[in-house]
Amino acid sequence: MPEDYNYYKDEYESKDFTISLATSSDEEEYSEYYENNENRVTTESSVKLPVSLAWKNLTYEIIDPKTKKQRKIIQNVSGIVKPGELLAIMGPSGAGKSTFLDLLAGRKDPKNVSGSVYLNGRPGNIKYVSTYVMQDDALMGVLTVRENIQFAADLCFPTTYTKSEKRSRVQNIIREFGLEKVADNKIGTVFVRGISGGEKRRCAIASQVLTLPKVIFLDEPTTGLDSAAAYNVMNAIVSMAKRYELTVIASIHQPSPETYALFDKLLLLGHGKTLYFGEREKALTYFDKLGYPCSPYNNPADHFLKLVNSDFMKDITEAEQHITNFSISFSKSPNIREINKQIDDSIEKANGNYSDGISKRRTQRYARNFLAQTFILMRRSLTNATRNILMFWIRVAMYMCLALLMGSTWWKVGFTQISIPDRFAAHFFSVAFLSFMSVAGIPGFLEERLVFQRERSNRFYSVGPYVLANTLISIPFLMIISLSFSMIAYPMIGLHENIHNAFNFFLFLFLALFVAESMVVFIAALIPIFVAALAITAFANGFFMVVEGFFVRRAAIPKLLKWGHYIDYQKYAFEAIIKNDFVGLTFNCDPDPSGQAKCRCAYGLNSTDTCTFTGQDVLDYRGYYDINLVKWALALLGLVAAFRFGFYLVLLFRKGRH
């Protein structure tokens, strides 16, 4: 080690921003808590002993899409991490750090994986004793630090825990991660200033390690943080790992000297090959013996990354050989023999009791049952929706302004013959505008989707409760939107003056909006890219407007597009509200400009003696003679169910990298 290396660490830890994780009294409190609750704190298994994680000749191969040949992404990597240790996986971009982390965490297709992974010397299911902390800080921005962690506790602790026990654990984890000062501050959104990046990262990690999982995987936990924030994050993790004997493995990119000093072991990867594995303190000596000494004033992490980075070598063969030389040197070193010995020893020592609770047999998947998961998610979604002005309240204001605009444009359309096209247009645009503007819900869903991915991957809950909670909580807010629009636009336009008709107008606008919202979340889940989801949703709504039957009569819609007419939610809502409005109304014909007749009825309806015709006459004349409000309402509900089921299937099968 460089002489002044410990000086940097001591100097860094003396700064005000360094976390003081525990006083002696705090330590006793945490130790007592852990001892009393240790065998209850892991919700997914009954593991009572710390877990060592070992892997031998781990290899990951894929079919190269260009050459169509097998390509090894990770090649024969071996190693072991013991309880209380932090292994840092380092290497240049493209070295395979995140891929290797995913392999250890069991997040890759086993068909492409060879080699062995051992938990306490035996094969086991890593998912039930571990948590995986993603690189993204997926948190509810309108919730406070405490609320984010508390909701996580409600989801991942079983019913054997009382409310006070869960609150106590939440308070302890807040202390452990140095978040007491900001515990009641909101995370932050585009409208609300929140906590710092380092505090946000610590909150994200804290919410996922509440149950003290035996193994913690972290995907680049310091990315995007300054050196002080990065150190605070890693220091909190290391302190917790030492205190509770947790096994921690983190991929990390370019750590500062102070952060580097926190690591127990180092795995250096290059092109998926092991260039070094062993104790962090011995890495400098190892490379020094290879002829690559590190200056006392250099950051060892930077030194190693420069050594193994071949990206800027002009000759591809030379670059590959450069990495291969380091790999061969390590394979011939005493390190690899020591690794294999430790792995073999752990296998020999393993027995049924030592690996109890981590066998391949699946244990309880979730801490809470289906209904409990649903109610907790509904409670959180309700809190999020009421506070997040981007999700609904801006939309409410937008729809109210739109209602005022429409009411002003179609002000008191009247009951004359000439007003009929205006009345049809008002109904058409009422449905079209409400449906089209549902795209405003895409950003809010995409933000929530990140939280869903993180929590689902760590088995907080299953897909069903999330979809059900999302569906149920959206209903009252969509009702508020539809009601606010209807209460303004309906009387201003001068539609059917009957409370029953006004209610039907609101009801079918709500059902149309419910379908539109369901279609939006389905598309956004299928293609979780804002611009792409926006474009596809806009195209779908545009298509439905064309085949709705307003611009082109039903009979004139080309056969090639006729199918679209019958699955068009806008068609059912539009036809329902025109029947609701027109039936029961009487319209006056226009005067005959020639004076030869009493009046002229453009629709050729009724006799010129009365100079009137009914709304039903208009509907029949235009071909709307088969509208059934009950059936049309059921059709809309069926479309809601179809899109929501599609939403469920997409979330169930589309897991992505995380």
Image: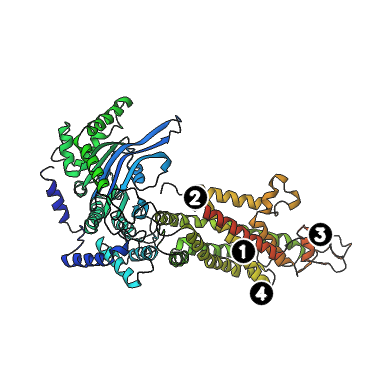
Which badge, 3 or 1, comes first in the chain's sequence? 1
Q: Quadrant of residue 623?
A: bottom right
> On the rendered structure, is 381 left or right of 339?
right
Q: Could you say where residue 27 lies in the image, as x and y percent from the top left?
A: 19, 64
Which badge, 2 or 4, comes first in the chain's sequence? 4
Which badge, 3 or 4, comes first in the chain's sequence? 4
> On the rendered structure, is 627 left or right of 369?
right
Which badge, 1 or 2, comes first in the chain's sequence? 1
Q: Could you say where residue 618 lies in the image, as x and y percent from the top left?
A: 78, 62
Mark 3 and mark 4: Cα distance apart in space:
29 Å
The answer to whether the residue labelled 2 contacts the one labelled 4, judged by CB atoms less than 8 Å apart, is no
Q: Could you say where residue 594 lies in the image, as x and y percent from the top left?
A: 86, 60
Foreground of the two, 470 or 131: 131
Foreground label between 3 and 1: 1
Q: Amino acid at mark 3?
A: Tyr
The answer to whether the residue labelled 3 contacts the one labelled 1, judged by CB atoms less than 8 Å apart, is no
Foreground label between 2 and 3: 2
Give residue 653's mark.
2
Which quadrant is home to the N terminus?
Answer: top left
Foreground of the two, 585 or 183: 183
The answer to whether the residue labelled 3 contacts the one labelled 4, judged by CB atoms less than 8 Å apart, is no
Task: Determine which residue is flagged by label 4.
Answer: 499
Mark 2 and mark 3: Cα distance apart in space:
54 Å
- With respect to residue 396, does 540 lie above or below? above
Q: Amino acid at mark 4?
A: Ile
Give residue 509's mark.
1
Q: Residue furthest left?
A: 3
Looking at the rendered structure, the secondary structure element under dot 3 is: loop
